[in-house]
Amino acid sequence: MKLATFTHNGSTRIGIVEGDEIMDVSAVAGVPSDMVTLLESGPSGLEAVRKATTAARPLPLSSVRLEAPVLRPRKFLGLGGSYKSHVKEVAHLIAPPKHQTWFNKQVTCVNGPYDDIHLPKVSDTLDYEGELAIIIGARGRHVRGRDAARQMTAGFTVCNDFSVREWQTRAFTATLGKSFDTHGPLGPWMVTLDELANAHSLSLRTWVNGELRQDGNTSELIYRFTEMIEELTTVFTLEPGDILTTGSPAGVGAARQPPLYLRSGDVVRVEIEGIGHIENRVVPEP
């Protein structure tokens, strides 16, 4: 199931994407209008959404504005140095991490799948990182094992972890360089776990102005999704709607010699097998 958050005629709600249509399930009685509320309702809520498609009003996908699947996650976390190819390409810049290295992207950076990205006034070191993101579907702490981690996972979406490299290096946390407004586009929808059974073997590609920059596969990940959820829930509770971006393969602009950063007018497209693509244009920060 492809669950999307969309805006139509000034109202934002959720729907199921089927081909070139979106089924407006929020119009059916008892179905939530936002993704976090839906995920908090658990498996019964998702099942109600599936059943609601028979009574839902279909809308042309071209007539709606697709938003980030989760507009207001409680947490937006990113994992650094998680692809073997990326660790190798930046070895001349940073030492390989000994453990999972997580950072915060402030939730105010959440952006739509086709919205503009701001080129900061304070830096010209804007970089792209195409990533697969996990959307958490259940509350959990001290989660252990594959089955428990799968029960925590609602589905997956595409993310571009835009990074302002100059500000990323201001502190070990990397938070400032990862959190500029608009720098967390997500989408175009969430593909539920049951439709993406083998998320550890998906093609991931990033293009800039039509030039292929990243050509990786999630099979390169150093850590499995189970290990990521185990690591995080050892420390704190994950909640429905939380976003976990799982890292980026080789090909980022900062690793080139000389570095090749984004400029105003550049168009960045990230596509992941089995999910879809997001595409964002870089514009000057207003």
Image: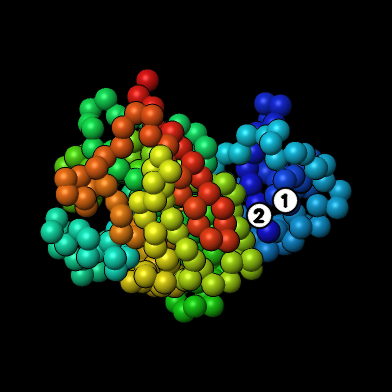
Q: What residue is shown with label 2?
A: 2
Quadrant placement of the C terminus: top left
In the image, taking residue 1 as reference, residue 221 lies left or right, namely left
Q: How is the image coloured?
A: rainbow
Query: Residue 134 placed where, x, y %?
Result: 49, 59
Q: Secondary structure at mark 1?
A: loop
Identify the residue at horizontal 22%, vertical 60% (top origin). Answer: 89
Q: Could one spot residue 134 in this view of the protein?
A: yes
Q: Is residue 44 above or below residue 266?
A: below
Camera-near label (1 vs 2) is 1
Query: Residue 177 placed where, x, y %?
Result: 26, 41
Q: Nearer the viewer, residue 2 or 114?
A: 114
In the image, taking residue 29 as reference, residue 248 lies left or right, namely left
Q: What residue is shown with label 1?
A: 19
Give the amino acid type for the residue marked by disc 1 in the picture. Answer: Gly
Q: Secondary structure at mark 2?
A: strand
